[in-house]
Image (cartoon, rainbow, N blue to C red):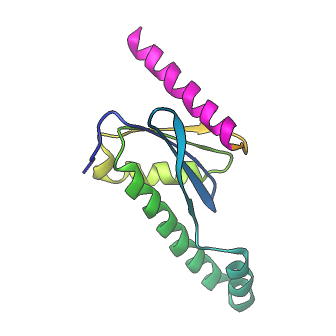
Amino acid sequence: MKTTTNKELGIWMDHSIAHIIVFTDQWNELKTIESNFTHHDKANSLAKSESLFHNKEQQLQAEFYKKLEDVILNYDDVLLFGATNAKTELFNRTQKDKRFTDIKITIKEADKMNTTQKKIFISNYFEKEKASTLS
């Protein structure tokens, strides 16, 4: 159900936040999506039961990934990057879902970055990708 064509998207993410960066006339951060699972939730859940903690964490993490999947569906070429394995977890979810069959999703390791560094990282990735398809 893609509504755009040839659109590139970069998502810097960890388990608690995702910075969604798109190219219009330049790379711009479109929005930030945060996980609803907070440190306060973690402390409360652990105090009650470790099992409850893991169930709540998994439920809220799934909601976080679902929000990101809804954004990804509108793009053709997506770069997931960040320092944690959250990008791999999201990638694995998309690979099991037929809605993502025609979307190219790539994962790359990246440290914590400021906004400018994220934009440069994405720009470099897509420039190299375009150069390799022209060769």
Residue reaching furthest to the bottom: 48
> Which residue is nearer to you in this view: 107 or 113?
113
Quadrant of res 16: bottom right
Whether the magenta-drawn stretch holds residue 65 is answered as: no
> Which residue is nearer to you in this view: 70 or 61?
70
Q: Could you tell me which quadrant the C terminus lies in?
A: top left
In magenta, the rendered stretch is 115-135
Give the vertical position of 60 relative to 89 (above or below). below
Does residue 46 appear left or right of residue 135 in this picture?
right
Does residue 24 appear left or right of residue 107 in this picture?
left
Image location of residue 59, percent across then percent down: 51, 74
Q: Main secondary structure of the magenta part?
A: helix
Image location of residue 129, percent across then percent down: 47, 22
Give the vertical position of 94 relative to 51 (above or below). above
Residue reaching furthest to the top: 135
Give the vertical position of 35 relative to 21 (above or below). below
> Which residue is nearer to you in this view: 44 or 125?
125
